[in-house]
Amino acid sequence: MASSIRVRATSSGDTTEVQALIQHPMDSGFVKNAKGELVPPHFIQEVTFEYGGKSVFVADWGPAVSKDPYLKFAFKGGKKGDELKISWTDNKGGTDQTTAKIQ
Amino acid sequence: MSNEIDKTRRLILQGAAVIALAGITGIRFGLTEAFAAANDKYPEEAFKQKNGDDAIKSLYGKTAEKSDKVKLDAPEIAENGAVVPIGVSSSLADVTSIAILVTENPFTLAAAYKIPAGTVASVSNRLKMAKTTNVIAVVEAGGKLYSASKEVKVTVGGCGG
């Protein structure tokens, strides 16, 4: 299966800018479906970005984060061609991970 | 990922056991592991708070003071409450954490980010908003909390189907 995570990491010398887009319903538990039943909460709780074996960014999310979440941040260091590892876990125990080459 | 978390947790438990069994020799190891645990843990309780102040207290254990060094980028008017772009950045030194709260949502805390040393104190994401609301950005820097807030007018709420 294709990864749920799309990442672009771009190095500009000193810093590496990371943009990530994850496919996930991010159901809050407050929205009803067409039959009028509440859709149970299903959302990503934690996203971790690791570079060189160290986490460079950790996101803790609640259900208020939009569907198919987008995230942008930057960290110092990061060489072109090196790998950035991204993984997420949701409230139902679902998980996915991917690695992206810094460009 | 979840396997790794499990592994870390098991390590932490082992660390705790080592303290209990080995006493002083285990303390150093135990402390570093416990600190890692505090950093790794998902703040379940904080995400359940219905009031902004409670959520901040639950997350950080202290209150925030307003600061113009916290920059909150949010639209004046959001046409679609389901997708509101929000950015937070800060010129403060030693930023360790950034949290974003949406006060009118059922649960106020929307997102909390850990900023390790070397990571730039700036984050952008997209949040859901039920209705017109205040958005509060909280930045933890040098062990203290600073905040900024802004009202976002929502014309179509993010809670509809």
Image (spheres, rainbow, N blue to C red):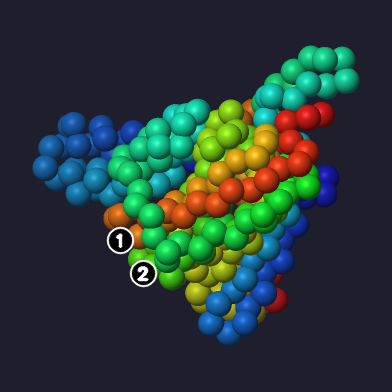
Residue A59 vertical placement versus A83 (above, below): above
Quarter of the image that includes the C terminus of chain B: top right
Q: Nearer the viewer, residue A70 or B14?
A: A70
Quarter of the image that includes the N terminus of chain B: top right
Q: Which mark is residue B93?
A: 2
x and y, in percent, of residue B42 in the image: 48, 38
Residue A38 vertical placement versus B52 (above, below): above
Amino acid carrying label 2: it is Ala
Q: CA distance from mark 2 to mark 1?
A: 7 Å
Q: Nearer the viewer, residue B46 or A17?
A: B46
Mark 1 residue crowding within 10 angstroms, few (<14) / some (14–19) / many (20+):
few
Q: Residue at x 50, y 74 (%)?
A: A76
Q: Nearer the viewer, residue B21 or A92?
A: A92
Q: Residue at x 71, y 61 (%)?
A: A7
Question: In this rendering, would A42 be left or right of B156?
Answer: left
**What chain does mark 1 sit on?**
B
Identify residue for label 1: B142
- Callouts 2 and 1 close, C-beta under 8 Å: yes
Q: Give residue B87's quadrant in the image.
A: bottom right
